[in-house]
Every structure is written in structure tokens, then in C-alpha cells.
Amino acid sequence: MLTGELPANGPPVRTVPSTPKLPADYYLQNFNTLLDFVFSNYRHLLNEEERHFYHAFNHLVTDSQRLYVRLASRSSEFIRCKSLHYPEIQQTGKTVTNLIDSGFLSIAEASDASEWVSIFTRADLAEVLPAPLKDKQVDASVLQAQDLFGQSPLALLMANHTIVKTRYRATLQCYRLLFFGNLQQDFSAFVLRDLGKRSYEPYPIDHTNLPFTSRRQIEAYLHYYHCCDVYESVKTQGTEALVEIQRSLPLLQADDRTLSRRLAKLSNRIARQLERCNALDEASEIYRTTRRPPARERLARIAHKRGNTAQAFALCQEIEADPGDAEELMFAQQFSTRLAKTGSINYVGETTVKPPMQRLKLEKLSLPVELECALHYAKEGKCFYVENALVGGMFGLATWDILFAPIAGAFFHPFQSAPADFQESDFYSQRESLFEKRFSQINNGLLAELALDNFHYKYGIANPLVSWQRLDRQLLTLALKRISTPDWLHLFDYLCKDIRNNRSGLPDLVFFPDTGGYRFIEVKGPGDRLQKNQLRWMQHFEQGNIEYSVALIEYSLDSASREY
């Protein structure tokens, strides 16, 4: 069978509740939850405007609060009042006036027309323009230049429509940052939870180890996200614009690993874009400041590109002596071997893994190549298309309580699918004693109990390692029966030491022959090549005598030419 078909003993049988009906002003309740959390925990770090906003908002009447939250949630800060209609808000016009009087909205200015003209439809614009629209987009200068009945179309537009601007958007951004710890998440997290679309582990919130401890730190995060937005808007504009972004980045914060990691990652993106512009000096300067993989790899490649083999090799040796992660180490070994072929350096690296290959000639079906291959092996046993889901999922189920352990600073808001340091290099070392104890329990035969119990009781709860839609009880039970405890421990040990890099790269299929045993199978269609993370896993398989192979797929000529 293939993963995706639900056997009789698949996911736990649960009564699926109907989609809950949210209160009409659910968004206001969520907004207040966020505001209260931030004000309660970070009042001493808020500036005067942010504190004023909290008190002023709480003094608004309910309908004014509702309308402000509705408007502040829109992507544009400018709104046409004619378009406003919310069933739960009475007398919208009066409410708009109240928000203007209390300073939460302001009347849009003609000088801001370049920012608000896009909120009007072509039909709206056609009413005030003397000539038919030709361009898809109309800018403010066109509206100002033309004349109709002695007035500019811009003036007519403003006379016919009340246009307001939502205020305090920067303040709201700060509140959102302090609640979520990032600006990727927003109020949709509340809605998905309330609708039952996404469930989270009920971990305790650590109010004593919140991520922000100073105003300087908050400003650095806000500036970092501003730089991210600027980078996306100017990344194709050449060297000068890219260098300017790098210069404007906040300084690395030695006491804030999360911000330092994000800054280094953005710097590497900027440097890589500079490489594409052939600004190698500028790119190299940035790479030397970050040290985050793949910075040293890129420096070695730049040195080689410039013909400086000795410098490239020295960088590879530096990486081998102190690798940032397994991927960086593999690069250093492979690139050193490549440099040695020039004859200018001496290097004897580790033997490159040579995976066992099996060529299969299949009839082309209207299926992904992995599923076609799984169908082939299913003739001789059970074959599942799992990729990273089996090993990662089994590890996530077996160590569930460790992943969500109350480590200082790991959990600080209720919408985390992973601890805050999940991507950090010291994730394992922070929990080493817990993992070692768990591995001892697994070695004593508790893996099946741990994994299957959590599969039943935690089903559907967000876990960064568990893909619920790709796991079922039949697969887990068979894998626990066929894959030995020492093999599981060998797989888990490699995965947990560098989860960020090693949670991917596992083979596409797991095959359980009717004759017994198991084998991991990586499927490669015509033109596909093994990736670095796949080769690393295969090297680890060989170190643990875990059976695996690579299936090289070829299609028969008659089926390849058939039309579907």
C-alpha cells in the first residue's frame, strides 16, 4: 500500500466537530488579548505613544474599537468610507467621526494621493476623468494634470469620497512583534485556532524568560524587519543599493541569538545577491562578518573563482577544523577533493559515499515518479512514500514531551508549533540530559509505547517534526516491528544533533519486503541528481549498516511517447 491510503487502523477515530461559529466581534476579543498580554508583560519597555495607544483604545466605545480593528487589519492604511459595511457595527458614519475625533483615524491629504489612489476601482476613476482610461494603472499625477468642470479629477475624487487613514500602524507593529516575537505571524493565528483548523500543544507560557528585555532590542528587531522589506524592493537594483542595506542593518546582538541568526541570514542573502552582480569584494566583506553557513563556503568559491586555490583550500581546512554544521563540513571535504585535482595542493579526504544503484524500467503513468516506483516495489511487499515523514515523525512522537519541555525562553506565546530555539545550533545541548534519558528508555524497549500513545493522544496537534497527513498507525506499527531499536537510535542520534539541516534529505520510500527486513529507497527520475543532504544521510546509513539504495528510473519508449 502507499502512504495516503487510510487503513482500518489508521488515524484515531474521532468525532469531527462542526466548524465553530465565532462571535461577531471575535477579532476584537483577539486584539484585546494581544494588547493586554503585551501591556502586562512589556509596559516598562513601551514608549509614550505605545502606552498612550493602549489606554486610549480602552477608552473607546465598543463600536469604535470594532471599526478601528477592522480597518487596522486591512493591508492599505487608506480606506474609502463609502465601502465600509460591517453588520456588527451600528452607524458606521458616526463611528468613523468618533475615531477621527479621538485620533485613531485622520482625513487623507491630497499630498498623499500617490499612496491612496490605488484603493479606487477603474469605475470610480472613470467618473472623474474626462477621457477614457487607457493605462491599467492611474497615478496621482494623471489625476492632477487633467481638468473637468474647472476642477482637477483629484479634487473631484476627494469631494465625492471621504478617504481616511488609519493611525498607529507602527505602534500595532510593535505590539505584534512583542506578542509573537516576529512579524510573520498575525491575527490569523487566533482565527485558525478558534476555528479548529490548527491546534497547539498546551505548553506553559514562560513569563519570566520573555524574549525582549530592553527598548534597544525592540528597536533593533523593528529595524531588521524594515531592512528585510527594503531588501525585497531593491534587490535587483544593483551593488550600491545592496551595500546601503547592509550598512543600515542593526549591529549583531551578542546577547540575542535569535536576532543575530536572522541578521546573519539576511546578510548572507545580500552578499549572495552582490555575487550575482559580480561585486565580489563587497560580497566577501559581508561574508567575513557573518560566519554563518554558507558564508565560508561562498568565500572559498569566490577565492577559487579568482584563481586563488591556496586561499580556497585554507578556508576549507578552517571549516573542517570547526564546521558550523554537517552541510558545511561536507562542502569542505568535497571542494578540497576538487581543488586537489588541480595538482597544486595535497589532500586526502574521506571516501565519497557510493550508493547502491538499481535501474528500473517502468511504464510511465500519470503519477509522480516516486509513486510509480512505490507501486513497483509493492508487488513484493509493502512500500510507503514517506520522504522525511517517517523518521522525523517517529522521533517527534517519541520525544514529544522533550520538544515541548519548559526550557527557559522556549515558549512565550500560545501559537508556537516549536520552541523558540528549535532552529538554534544548541537546541540539542540545551536538552541533552532529557534526550539521553529518552534514548535510554528507547533502548529498553519503550519506543513503540511512546510513539503510538502520542500518535493517539496528540493527533493533529502542531509539531515541527510530525506530518500527520503522511503518517498512519499501519505504517508506524510495521516500521516499529521491522526496524530494530539500534537502527532507530542511530537515525535519531544523527537527526537530533542538527535538526535544522538533518530533518530533510531522507529517502523517498521505505520498503518492507514480504521476506522480512526493510530498506530505504531514494527515487531518481531521468536527469535527477543526489543532493548534499541526501548524500549525508546515506553516509550515515553506511556507518550504521542501514540498508538503502537508489532507484534510477527509466521509462519504456512506447509508454514515454504515449499521451495522457
Image (cartoon, rainbow, N blue to C red):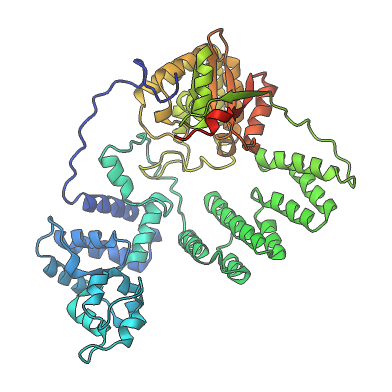
Q: Residue furthest left?
A: 91
Quarter holding residue 415: top left
The percent position of residue 115, horizontal first and vertical second, equals 35, 73
- Is residue 410 in view from this perspective? yes
Q: Say above or below: 244 vs 192.
A: below
Q: Residue furthest bottom?
A: 150
On the rendered image, what quadrant is the N terminus found in?
A: top left
The percent position of residue 475, horizontal first and vertical second, equals 45, 19
Q: Is residue 307 left or right of residue 405?
A: right
The percent position of residue 466, horizontal first and vertical second, equals 44, 30
Q: Say above or below: 171 vs 37.
A: below
Q: Is residue 490 left or right of residue 563?
A: right
Number of dots carrying numbers: 0
Quarter holding residue 500: top right
Q: Say above or below: 198 vs 116.
A: above
What residue lies at 33% left-to-right and 21% top-to-bottom?
12
The percent position of residue 102, horizontal first and vertical second, equals 20, 71
- Is residue 387 in view from this perspective? no
What residue lies at 81% left-to-right and 48% top-to-bottom?
313
On the rendered image, what quadrant is the C terminus found in?
A: top left
What residue lies at 36% left-to-right and 15% top-to-bottom?
9
- Residue in the foreground of this view, choosing between 441 and 212: 441
- Residue in the foreground of this view, choosing between 261 and 519: 519
Q: Is residue 148 left or right of residue 470?
A: left
